[in-house]
Image: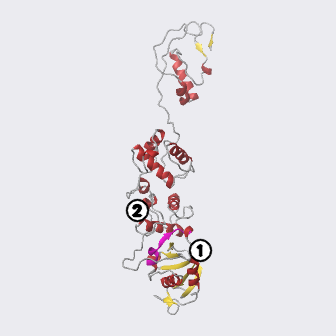
Amino acid sequence: MIRTVPRGTHRAPGAAVIDYRGLAAPVGRGVGGAALLGAVTATAALQGVESARAQAPAPATLGSINGAAAAAPVTLPTVAPAAPDQFAGVKLRPGSRGAAVEHLQALLNQRGASIAVDGVFGRNTTGAVRALQSAAGIGVDAVVGPKTWSALAGNIQISSSAPAPATSAPSPAASSQPKLRQGNRGDAVRTLQSQLNERGASIAVDGVFGSGTAAAVRALQSAADIGVDAVVGPKTWNALYSNVRISDAPPSRDSGRAPVASVGSFNGQAIVDAARAQKGVRYTWGGSSPASGFDCSGLVHHAYNQAGINLPRKTAKGYTFGGRIISQAEAQPGDLVAFTSNNYGHIGIYVGNGRIIDASGSRQRVVERNIWNAPHVFVTYR
């Protein structure tokens, strides 16, 4: 709108004052006057650079105002476009959670993935990110940074490339994590616990590295065939971000011994009943019969063979690694509970509901009792 004001109030005659209050967003063509540039700039700042830029045509050359001397042509400055993706500056990696992960998962599905949009950067999301990175020809590390966000904004389809397999070299996600051991607390422990659950464990994600977390770490280390010490260093972090499953325990490490149990039909309740029949029998080091007494591994040997499972006589450690290490959630009556202290020095038969039957050296007899607070793993021959 152009207003006419009394003469003498401006240097040039005629209407020369423009009311800019109506210029809320679009900058029109051919707006004139050197003073107009500042007004347009101020309006854009108030209304938002993004809105002004999105609706404006090509930069305009300023003309002249009616009756005023024409100013030299001025070109509006070009504003760098804002990032089209609000999460493009967020770095994500396996274990991340939240709205940014949900957005990532939705974009991955648009690129050809088929994963849950649940805000948890787990195993399936990791595989989809690796597949996208491989298809885009960028570093395959499952870490979502600027290059991966850029690939997600493009036309690349995940189906054009198979997911890249995990390598033995530590991933950036693994190498950036701290060393953890039993007793630690905090966010790094929560990340550890979440990844252990992704690998097949069933533990609380509470940020406390207790006996349950230690047992799950040992199970993972055993499945990955790395040192079993419950200390989470680079090799263990790398296993957490790989395709290793806690249930993928290695075969028996007792070279030269008899083969693993010849299992025809595993009857867990028969094993439990055979062990219960020996309650009260005295503890004897190396014993494996009611007449001679039992030590912990001798009771396992006796109960399994009484239940029709041809299990050779081994040490507690031999039985641990002769079977398959599983999570507590998978354990059933008749499976074994191996205590990892003293180099896997004790073992018992799982009854269920957190209880075992074992030949106890401290009580000097076969007893049924609750599993106590000591590092342990579950083992199955099913």
Q: Secondary structure at mark 2?
A: helix
Q: Residue at x 42, y 65 (%)?
A: 224
Q: Nearer the viewer, mark 2 or mark 1?
A: 1
Q: Amino acid at mark 1?
A: Gly
The front one of 46 and 292 is 292
- Inter-mark Cα distance, 2 to 1: 31 Å
Q: Tell me the kind of residue under disc 2.
A: Lys
Q: Badge 2, how many Cα within 10 Å: few under 14, some, many 20+?
A: some
Query: Is any atom of residue 248 visible in this view?
Result: yes
Hey, which residue is sitting farthest front in the picture? 264
Q: Which residues are magenta?
A: 318-328
Q: Residue furthest bottom?
A: 291
User: Mark number for residue 354?
Assistant: 1
| Image color mode | secondary structure
Q: Locate residue 256: give its quadrant.
A: bottom left
On residue 235, the disc is: 2
Residue 342 appears in the picture as rendered: no
**223, above or below 15, in the image:** below
Q: How many marks?
A: 2
How far from the left and from the top, in percent, is residue 114? 53, 48
Q: Estimate the x, y position of residue 2 in percent, counting from the top left.
A: 61, 12
Q: Which secondary structure lies at badge 1?
A: loop
The quadrant where residue 231 appears: bottom left
Within the magenta stretch, is there residue 138? no
Q: Residue at x 39, y 80 (%)?
A: 257
Q: Nearer the viewer, residue 355 or 161?
A: 161
| Residue 320 covered by magenta stretch | yes
